[in-house]
Image (tube, rainbow, N blue to C red):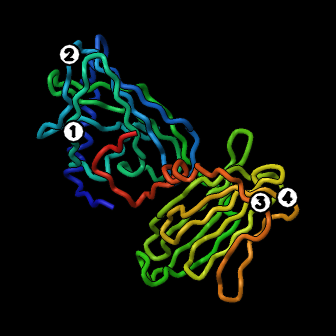
Amino acid sequence: MSVFTRTPMRRFLLLLAILLVCVEPLHAQIEVGLEIKRHFLMLYEPIVAIVTVKNMAGRDVQLTDTPSQSWFSFAVSRPDGQLVPPCDPDYRLTPLTIPAGETVKRSIVLNTIYPVRELGMYRVRALIYFSATDKYYQSRMIPLELSEGKTIWQHLAGVPEGAAGAGGTRKLSLLSFRQSDYSVLYARVEDVDSGMVYATMPLGHILGGLEPNAQVDTQSNLHILQAVGPKTYLYSCVSSNGELLSQDTYYSTTTRPTLHKNAAGMVALVGGSLQPDNGSLAEKAKLANKLSDRPVQIPTE
């Protein structure tokens, strides 16, 4: 986590407040869009922001940093209007050229570059600085609310030799989080000593009345089996560093799938029938990006 002194922080907040006043309102040469699919999220859950930038200048434009401005940023504020500064106020980005009339799209996990790690309401805008006009162009404002889930299972596990953070202790948790008409099961991995949260990842729906089953193996990997539908189960495995190692769907056929831990501490799924096509792991892994990551580039979609 970046450490800031009070004076640079004040300068940053004052500069951003001035820039927001200078945002181009009409006849914009650049149109900025922002999409965040869910506005009600769990604390520490990856906040995936999708930003679109449309070139309406009638010519090719190049978006590039200047000595004092970054061409891409967000304005993140709390309800009282207080701006949330980025983790690194001096980050620099690769220039981007947009042909005339074209639109580019970028996605980023917002809370890897802004410390949005407190309960409550936030407001988010995407800002694009165009050095040729010396103006900022902004997206519409999107509200976000961060809340906490209900802990339904916890376990302390040591980090094994050979793994990152070996010798440390992880708190492995399962939490339920209520959406509008259903609940979602989340896995959270955090360091006991530092309090750092390595991951808070959605695993899938929780079928009402059926508690998930969790086991921890000798490598401190967390195995979770949850019912997600009639005779349908999701089996996930999460490492002690918050990585989604696997996720597969099983059906209850002649036998019901269950987790089994043997005398040697190995965990395996017994029974049930594996669904042939399990191509969702890559998408799940995108949502499970660790908040400990600090990317300096905006990942392409």
Q: Quadrant of residue 224?
A: bottom right
Quarter of the picture containing the C terminus is top left
Picture residue at 39% right of the left edge, 32% below the top: 51
Residue type, mark 4 in image: Thr
Quarter of the figure with the N terminus: bottom left
Q: Vertically, is 29 above or below 205? A: above
Looking at the picture, tell me which residue is in the foreground, 32 or 138: 32
* Residue sitting farthest toward the left: 67
Q: Is residue 294 left or right of residue 199?
A: left
Q: Earlier in the sequence, mark 2 or mark 1?
A: 2
Q: Which mark is residue 273?
A: 3
Q: Nearer the viewer, mark 4 or mark 1?
A: 4
* Residue holding disc 4: 253
How far apart, in angstroms, are the residues tagged by discs 2 and 1? Answer: 22 Å
Which marked residue is nearer to the observer: mark 2 or mark 1? 2
Residue under the point 53% across and 50% down: 119
Residue 70 circle label = 1
Q: Which residue is mark 2?
A: 59
Residue found at x 40% / y 37%: 81
- Out of 88 and 265, give the one closest to the viewer: 265
Of labels 1 and 3, earlier in sequence is: 1
Q: Kindly check if marks 2 and 4 are in contact, taking CB atoms under 8 A apart as contact.
A: no
Q: Quadrant of residue 34?
A: top left
Going from N to C along the chain, the mark reached first, 4 or 1, is: 1
Tell me the SS state at disc 4.
Answer: loop
